[in-house]
Image (cartoon, rainbow, N blue to C red):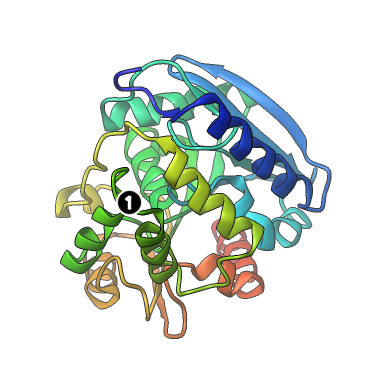
Amino acid sequence: MSGIGHFTNAQAQASYLSLYDATIAAIPGSPTVHDIPTTFGQVRVYRFGSATGTPYVLLHGRGATTAMWEPNLAGLAASRTVYALDSLGEPGRSIQTLPIRTSADQAAWLTEVLDALGIDRAHFAGVSGGGWLVFNQALHTPNRVATAALIEPAHVLARFSPKFLLGGLSLLPFLPDSLGDRFLAWVSGNPDMTLPISQLLTTGMHTYRMALPMPEYGNDTLLRSLRMPVLALLGGRTVPHNPHEAARRAQMLIPNNETEIWPEATHALSGEFPDQLNARLLKFAEQAA
């Protein structure tokens, strides 16, 4: 299993997937489910709604799965067809079968998913690690990305803070789970960790071993190369990076950007302000049409 994400054992996998299925089943909307084969493995995709026009593709934060979008899906799907997927190489219903070693590999499997679904062009929105995936896709297949919404993107507009990197060591498998749980709660703005989505995140982090490459940093040259409209939304209380530095770089370097700091939001902006985020995403897509 070298280089391939996997659960620690069969029992852990069964327990996690049982919790995952229950959490997904609680999302309203009766989505259409697709399991898309790609070069690097099978990708689980959920389609919500059937509105006409350019669809939205949603990419979740690291280890958070499609379930993290539950507060947003109904509102977005009322106006746009929405595709939400479980990122390959992370816990969820996607199954990695080959190593993903480069940023190009990350773009390749997502492009194969778009091809299989018949999506020539889409609005993309991603949170945290999903924000990096959106950024990466915009670099590799700019003609497929109508707009790019980077919501608290990881390692794109600002580097990780030393405190965040140090705290991340608490997720190492030989340390007590309670340390990692406290770290994840801190990053997420200290939500109720007994909620199903919180339990799903912590369980996945403890029982799934990811083997993905370090995200390529959004250096000045890469940010300047973006030509599609980019919406950068940052939490004023975020901890993985400095939001003011991130906003400064976005505004200075990205040619066509709308950049905002939401003062009361943390890294978990999408779940903290779902109605406001939905309205902002839909307005941004409409403006770009």
Question: For this rendering, which residue is in front, 211 or 257?
Answer: 211
Residue that mark 1 sits on: 171
Q: Is residue 5 above or below residue 185?
A: above
Q: Residue 170 vs residue 235: left or right?
A: left
Where on the picture, by quarter, is residue 14? top right
Q: Is residue 81 above or below residue 100?
A: below
Q: Is residue 29 left or right of residue 202?
A: right
Residue at position x 30%, y 28% in the image: 104
Residue 201 in the image, given as x and y percentages of width and height: 52, 52
Where's the N terminus, which quadrant? top left
* Res 197 seen here: yes
What residue is shown at x 55% (from left), y 63% (from top)?
284
Q: Is residue 210 left or right of residue 12?
A: left
Is any part of residue 125 visible from this angle? no
Name the residue at the bottom extreme.
263
How many numbered callouts?
A: 1
- Judged from the image, the secondary structure of the residue bearing numbered disc 1 is helix
